[in-house]
Amino acid sequence: FNKKASAFLDVDVQTFHTSYLKFNTLANTGKINWDKCWTMVLADLGKNDRLAEFLNAYPSWKSKTINEDVVNLIDRLRLAGYKTGILGNNTADRAVEIRNTGIGNHVDALVISAEIGYSKPDPRAFRIFFERLNVDPKETVFVDDSEHALARAQEIGFTPVLFTEYDELVQTLKNLGVTI
């Protein structure tokens, strides 16, 4: 997403990502809606004149599909006796959509940032997540597709795994001693 959005707006990826991270927590914790978030991001980037065009294009960039391979992996992990959960940075509206997919039936805990008022990488979001999952962070492998979300892993105490592709994830879990 960051690459597509930065190319669309003609700014470098790091500049876009830095601006996005300044404001997305406000949307993910329900303090503002996404239109307001994007207004703030584009203003910060000096791209106010591209707002309508960006808002039109944005929905096609944000994937709402479920990775069935990952869901199957989650199911296998649960069958092997591991606790599984999802801690997602999303709005309240998106939380409803996520819950309606039935993904919550595949995990032991489903925690959405807008529902708890904190988003990753805030340690309070992780504390709530680990409490609901009833696990010790030190015994937890936390997988996320965002380096930003994993940034405070050492402070919080979990083992971070950056998700880039499915086969790599499976191998990394095996390397960590996770029985799949």
Image (cartoon, helix red, strand yellow):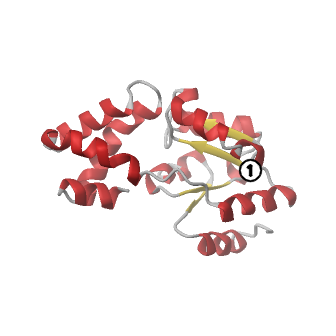
Q: Is residue 27 above or below residue 159?
A: above
**Position of residue 141 in the picture relative to residue 178 (left or right):** left
Q: Position of residue 30 (x, y in %)?
A: 46, 26
Classify mark 1: helix, strand or loop: loop
Q: Which residue lies at the image location 73% right of the left edge and 45% below the top edge?
A: 136
Q: Taking the image as drawn, is residue 32 in sight?
A: yes
Locate the C terminus by quadrant.
bottom right
**Quadrant in which the N terminus is drawn:** bottom left
The correct choice, above or below, for 22 with respect to 62 in the image is above
- At 56% from the left edge and 43% from the top edge, which residue is drawn? 88
The quadrant holding residue 87 is top right
Q: Nearer the viewer, residue 145 or 150?
A: 145
The residue positioned 72% from the left and 40% from the top of the image is 109
Give the residue pinned by disc 1. 84
Q: Is residue 91 above or below residue 8?
A: above
How crowded is the residue under tag 1: few (<14 C-alpha within 10 Å), some, or many (20+)? some
| Camera-nearest residue between 177 and 91 | 91
In the orientation shown, which residue stands out farthest toward the top? 31
Side of 74 where 43 appears, left or right: left
Q: Position of residue 8 (x, y in %)?
A: 23, 56
Does residue 112 appear in this view?
A: no
Q: Is residue 56 left or right of residue 96?
A: left
67 or 115: nearer the viewer: 67
Residue 71 locus on image (x, y percent): 70, 58
- The amino acid on which the numbered mark 1 sits, given as a three-letter code, is Thr
Say which of 134 and 171 sits in front: 171
Q: How many marks?
A: 1
Position of residue 129 measured from the top left corner of the image (x, y, whole percent) = 65, 38
